[in-house]
Image: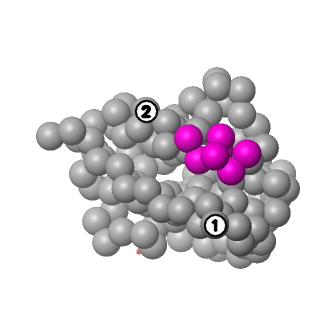
């Protein structure tokens, strides 16, 4: 799994077209959304993650929580992003992993949103620009 973490004044998106034949079904309110004072986490789920999704979810949540605490972010935006890797996991596994990451972060008490999966989306992001505002993480399951 590859993650790009951007501490932002805001992230907003608007769904455009389907990028997959069967994208995630979404309600009208999820067609456009925004969070302010947010840690935006762009995630590419990779083929290698399919061998142990549970472990990858756990490691991703731990990394995200670590950065949230370091930058003192108030909320998290989980954003499916297929452009951080050339070895993508299947859409079904990727969606499941992203949903689990969202779920676990909520269980820990964070305010979390997840951008819709399988759509082309317009988005606006305002990076804060401090030294820890742009970070990346690579997560792999143990052999
Ligand atoms: N492994 C993945 N990790 C994260 N997001 C993914 C993944 N696979 C698919 N997606 C989601 O599905 C959308 C389309 O995925 S894509 O790989 O970019 N494109 C396609 O699969 C098709 N357009 C054929 O190329 C992405 O924008 C993202 O929302």
Q: Quadrant of the C terminus?
A: top left
**Residue 60 placement, left or right of 56:** right
Q: Residue at x 36, y 69 (%)?
A: 85
Most extreme residue toward the left is 143
Say what secondary structure mark 1 lies in. Answer: loop
Q: Residue at x 82, y 63 (%)?
A: 9
The local crowd at label 2, few if under 14, some if 14 to 19, many if 20 or more residues have their Cα within 10 Å, is some
x and y percent of residue 89 in the render? Answer: 33, 56
Rounded to the nearest angstrom, the CA distance separating label 2 from label 1 is 26 Å
x and y percent of residue 58 in the render? Answer: 43, 33
Mark 2: is the Cβ under 8 angstroms from ligand 1? no
Q: Which residue is mark 1?
A: 131
Say what secondary structure mark 2 lies in. Answer: helix
* 101 up-or-down from 42: above or below: above
**Residue 72 placement, left or right of 70:** right
> What color scheme is it?
one colour
Q: Quadrant of the N terminus?
A: bottom left
Q: Is residue 38 magenta?
A: no
Disc nearer the start of the sequence (2/1): 2
Q: Quadrant of residue 6?
A: bottom right
* 110 up-or-down from 129: above or below: above
The local crowd at label 1, few if under 14, some if 14 to 19, many if 20 or more residues have their Cα within 10 Å, is few
Q: Residue at x 67, y 30 (%)?
A: 106
Which of pointers 2 and 1 indicates the residue nearer the eye?
A: 1
Q: Residue at x 41, y 38 (%)?
A: 59
Magenta stretch: give its range: 66-72
Task: Kindly tell me whether residue 28 is visible in this rendering.
Answer: no
Q: Which residue is mark 2?
A: 58
x and y percent of residue 109 in the render? Answer: 71, 26
x and y percent of residue 13 in the render? Answer: 75, 66
Task: Kindly tell me whether residue 139 is visible in this rendering.
Answer: yes
**Residue 35 placement, left or right of 19:** right
């Amino acid at each position: 799994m590859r993650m790009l973490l951007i501490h932002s004044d805001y992230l907003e998106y608007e769904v455009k077209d389907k990028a997959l034949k069967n994208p995630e079904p979404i309600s009208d309110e999820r067609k456009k959304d925004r969070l302010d004072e947010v840690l935006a986490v762009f995630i590419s789920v990779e083929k290698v993650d399919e061998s142990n999704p549970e472990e990858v979810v756990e490691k991703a949540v731990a990394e995200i929580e670590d950065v949230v605490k370091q930058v003192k972010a108030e909320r998290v935006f989980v954003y499916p992003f297929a452009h951080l890797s050339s070895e993508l996991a299947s859409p079904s596994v990727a969606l499941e992993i992203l949903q689990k990451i969202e779920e676990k972060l909520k269980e820990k008490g964070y305010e979390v949103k997840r951008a819709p999966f399988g759509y082309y989306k317009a988005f606006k992001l305002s990076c804060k620009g401090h030294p820890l505002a742009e970070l990346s993480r690579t997560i792999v399951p143990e052999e």
